[in-house]
Image (cartoon, grey):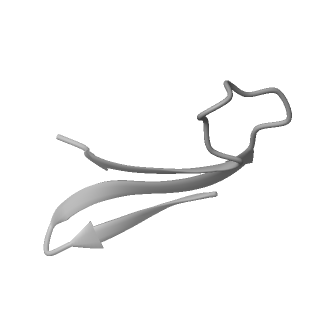
Amino acid sequence: MGRLIKIGKQPVNLMVGAYYNVIRPELGADWQLRTQVIFVF
């Protein structure tokens, strides 16, 4: 999921994703959460 917003006059691209790992290492996590902030110049 993502969205482009403006902070002041600066556009910022925000993204969030959640992933379920069906196949994973023995000590790995079941779920992962990925967040991303991109400043657009």
User: x%, y% of residue 39?
Assistant: 22, 47
For the residue pair 4 and 18, the one nearer the viewer reads as 18
Residue at the far bottom in the pictured view:
8
For the residue pair 2 and 25, the one nearer the viewer reads as 25
User: x%, y% of residue 31?
Assistant: 67, 51
Q: For residue 5, what is the image quadrant?
A: bottom left
21 over 6 or under it: above or below: above
* For residue 4, side relative to residue 23 (left or right): left
30 over 7 or under it: above or below: above
Residue under the image location 67 percent in, 24 percent down: 25
* For residue 3, side relative to residue 1 (left or right): left
User: x%, y% of residue 29?
Assistant: 62, 44
Residue under the image location 27 percent in, 58 percent down: 11
16 over 36 or under it: above or below: below
* For residue 35, side relative to residue 9 (left or right): right
For the residue pair 1 and 31, the one nearer the viewer reads as 31
Quadrant of the frame with the C terminus = top left
Residue under the image location 28 percent in, 69 percent down: 6
Residue under the image location 61 percent in, 52 percent down: 17
Residue at the far right in the pictured view:
22
